[in-house]
Amino acid sequence: MNKQLIVFVLLLASLIHGTLYAQTKRIAVAYSAISATQSGFYLAKDAKIFDKHGLYVDPVYVAGGSRVSQAVIAGEFAVALAGGNIVFADLAGGDIVTYGGVVNVPSFYLFVQPAIKRQEDLKGKALGITRYGASTDFTLRFLLKKWGLEADRDVKILQMGGQPEILAGMQAGVIHGGVLSSPGDFKAEGRFF
């Protein structure tokens, strides 16, 4: 487990412990992706680290960090693990406190159908992201701009829900590619390349 993930797990444990001290109440904690970037959370749950410290955590998958930030603002979750879109929520007037981060760079890969050989070949194609406003959306728009392509004009961006749905959309031919992180990138390599 890398150092940033360990720090996140410890911060999460201290936050939950402070909030629930001496209680046996269960707490739902949202996570935004089935991704290696959030593996510290899964590992802590599977290794019963939370339970060992009297913390009863129920992980709840909410596809896409933008949906997680909406749920936190709405009071559905007191604690969550989500991508960098939390910053956008705060800039837009949301009141979310960030305790730590697990990655400091986008950890995504753009996978496309084998027929796409160059960046220019993306014109007129549809690419999948998890949700509008999520880290996958930001990353794809950044790449397209860097390559001289205009999102939504040159390349259609479709929100698919989550990483598994992006893979399914690629396999079904609904989209020509998508933004993935581990383990989705390994699955894409096995299916398309």
Image (tube, rainbow, N blue to C red):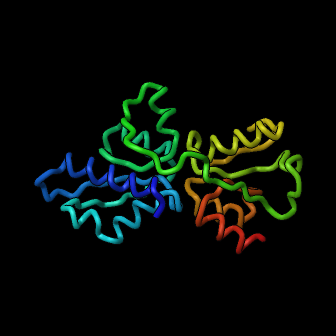
The location of residue 101, given as percent across then percent down, is: 46, 46
Give the residue drawn at x 21%, y 62%. Answer: 53
For the image, the number of numbered tags is: 0
Taking 97 as reference, is 87 left or right? right
Give the residue drawn at x 39%, y 52%. Answer: 8
Q: Hey, which quadrant is residue 78 in on the image?
A: top left
Give the residue drawn at x 20%, y 46%. Answer: 19
Q: Hey, which quadrant is residue 148 in on the image?
A: top right
Q: Hey, which quadrant is residue 100 in on the image?
A: top left
The location of residue 136, given as percent across then percent down, is: 61, 47
Give the residue drawn at x 56%, y 53%. Answer: 161
The location of residue 33, given as percent across then percent down, is: 50, 56
The location of residue 189, given as percent across then percent down, is: 72, 70
Kindly give the residue lying farthest to the left in the view shown.
22
Q: Nearer the viewer, residue 82 or 70?
A: 82
Taking 170 as reference, is 9 left or right? left
Taking 15 as reference, is 171 left or right? right
Kindly give the residue lying farthest to the bottom in the view shown.
190
In the displayed structure, would residue 148 be above or below residue 182? above
